[in-house]
Amino acid sequence: MLVRSSMISVLRTAAISAAYLVAWIGLDLLATSYGHDRGALSPWYFGAALTFYLVYTFGVRYAGLAVVAEVLRPLLLPPSGAHTSLLFYVLFGTIAAIGYAATAWFLRDVVRARVPFAGFRDASLYCAAVTWVPLALSLPLVALVCAFGRAPWAQYFSQVATFWVGDCVGLIVAVPALALYLTPRVAQSLVSPQVRDHATPIKPVLSAWLFVFLVGAIALGYAAVPLGITNDPLLFLTFVPLMMLAASGGLRLAIPGILVADAVTTALNALVPNAMLHPVSLQSYIIVSAMASILIGAIVDARYRKERKNRLLAAMDPLTGLPNRESLEHWIANAPTPLTLVMLDVDRFRLTNEGVSREAGNTLLRAIAERLQNVGATYLAHVSADEFVCAFVNPEIDRMALAKRVAGYFEQPFDAREAHVYASVSLGVAETIDPGERNQLLRQASIAMYRAKHGGGGRIAVYSDELAESVQSVSLASELFSALHDGELELFYQPIFDLDQGDCRCIGAEALLRWNHPRLGLIGPAQFLDLLETLTLADRVGAWVIEEAARQASAWNDRGLELQVWINLFPRQALDREVATLISRALDRYDLPADRIVVEVTERVVASDEAEVADAIHALAQRGLRTAIDDFGTGHSSLARLRDISAHILKIDRTFIHDSEMNAKARSMVQAVLTIASELQIVPLAEGIENRGQLELVRTLGCRLAQGYYLGLPMRANELQAWLEEVSAIAG
């Protein structure tokens, strides 16, 4: 094996050396031929570029080949004219080899500039080097040429310019091209991933037109010189398309654009010599444009890589390196079906953070991410602090078996730095075969996971519509606590009318609670009031309702609207004698008389026969507050209970009103309730008036007050105020 490896190394060295020597000698012949046709040296010279590239790419040990090439060239193909000593070629090659080998070493190993360029720093360092190093080397090299009689000393400075421009053109044109196209194939270690994989995208059609524009601009500029239009049009005409190539495609278009520009100008000058345009001037234009193009291309590539990195960072979780929630949602939207999602949440993860350390918690999450990569998921994402999602396209096993397989990966402990941690997880599963339902799948998996977690943890739950309904209630319970703090609760007001005078006159409005949920929109009381009544939060919400109702009553009073505001008490409030004090303080704050507030208590609470209810209602009456029994007829209160409660108003439930038009027994029940109310000196109110027939019926039966959608819908305070100002009363 060692012998084979050594043989491969020898063959590789020989191949590199042979390729360099053949290319160097061939290009030198071409340059010499080009220069002899014009009686001067070539304005471009690729020997320096080949030497620099050889040493930079393959190492300093190849630098001696530059001397070998200089010596072999006259030996194999002797130049015409006077014979030159072999010493000249040895010295010439040695100076060039040392100079360009040192430059390559400095760029690669000292300042660590990458060729191909990984950014603007690399490009600018390279451009600076290939500008000044050829100038510095041209001084001794031309002195050597003059010393050996190959050129008169009188032409020293012109020859320096020729040498300088020639080497500079070769370095600025050939080396970037070799680095772009050859280096990735022969020296992968020199090509960083960001250069190899993250180059600026190219638009083929636009690129083709830009190359046509480049060739046309050069041809036009070259043709304009003998016409005397200007002496330096190429500087401008070449510059524009090269800059456009660099701006549109970065270095992947800038470098071939430079190659094309140099080849076209050189070919034009060879085919159609122009005495008015010196070859050195011609190539100087290329150098200026090429350097600007390379620098702009490097900036464009760097900007693209930065934008791409930002996009990747935005789509990835920085802790685990997995796609984040946004990436998962985008993937789901385009994923094939059938599709199954398994969402898992690490149970009691906060305790892990607090009990061990935050860094240990992060280590645990990274370990979980690494282990989950073995579950065979089509897509894996880290969607929140302790939640992961495994997505399976067309899984081979059913969803419950799939979830159990994922859970099985948590049976062994995780190494969390300070300790071995056993992680329990709650899993929620959702699946669909309908592509149109994919956008709901992540929410459904989240709902199922939530149910599993609140079932005690360490469980698996599969999504269903029934599960969603139960989970929503639990979710709303937790969200209610922030609803009050965040100002999401709001009071609507439904007008109440007095029918006693033969017409309908609005005397007040019942305050009805609504919830402006940030995700679900406006939620009615049926969806959350029963739940709220079971929470201690009901005390705080009830106090807020009292305060807000009193404030609104005061605001209406300031506008000349003397309206009573009817407030519904929660059951726990109705059992509290202090509620009377709470309401009185609100009235005092807003300077309102006690008759501006009517307190409603449901018949269900009254029928509970608890002494606290009677005491609370009595306390309200002592402070001048009127009390209404709401939903009368739905509970089981007795006449004796009505006698003992100091109620002032009896609200007949809407079910009796709804049936009274067509049902004689229901109509008789309404009549009986009205009679009882009259005997007990309680004012009756008919709820749920939905049409004119019902309104006429309760009026005929002697009902004093009425409320319902026919008379007025629940509305916001400003809407009720505008409505009342527009129509102060409704004709009977």
Image (tube, helix red, strand yellow):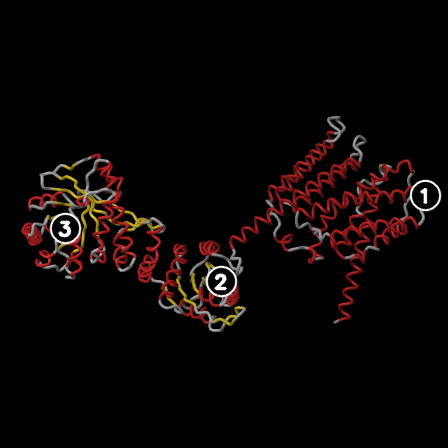
Residue 566, position as x, y percentages in the image = 20, 47
Viewer-nearest of discs 2 and 3? 3
- Residue 651 is tagged as 3
Q: Residues within 10 Å of mark 2 (few under 14, many from 20)?
A: some
The disc labelled 1 sits on which kind of residue?
A: Ala
> Which of the two discs, 3 and 1, labels the residue nearer the N terminus?
1
Front residue of 192 and 474: 474
Q: Is residue 308 above or below residue 269?
A: below
Q: Tell me the element at label 3.
A: strand
Q: Is residue 357 left or right of residue 633?
A: right
Q: Amino acid at mark 3?
A: Lys
- Closer to the camera, 217 or 177? 177
Farthest-out residue, top: 228
Element marked by disc 1: loop
Mark 2 / mark 3, whichever is N-terminal = 2
Position of 438 with respect to 151 (left or right) is left
Cα gap from disc 2 to disc 3, whole angstroms: 61 Å
Tag 2: amino acid? Thr
Vertically, is 252 above or below 477? above
Residue at the bottom extreme, as displayed: 412
Numbered badge on residue 378: 2
Q: Earlier in the sequence, mark 2 or mark 1?
A: 1
Nearer to us in this view, 290 or 256: 290
Expressed as whole percent of the image width and height from the top left, the position of residue 703 reads: 9, 46
CA distance for labels 2 and 1: 75 Å
Q: Quadrant of the N terminus?
A: bottom right
Total marks shown come to 3
Q: Residue at x 63, y 47 (%)?
A: 301
Residue where numbered disc 1 is placed? 82
Q: Closer to us: mark 2 or mark 1?
A: 2
- How far apart marks 3 and 1 lie (CA) works out to 127 Å
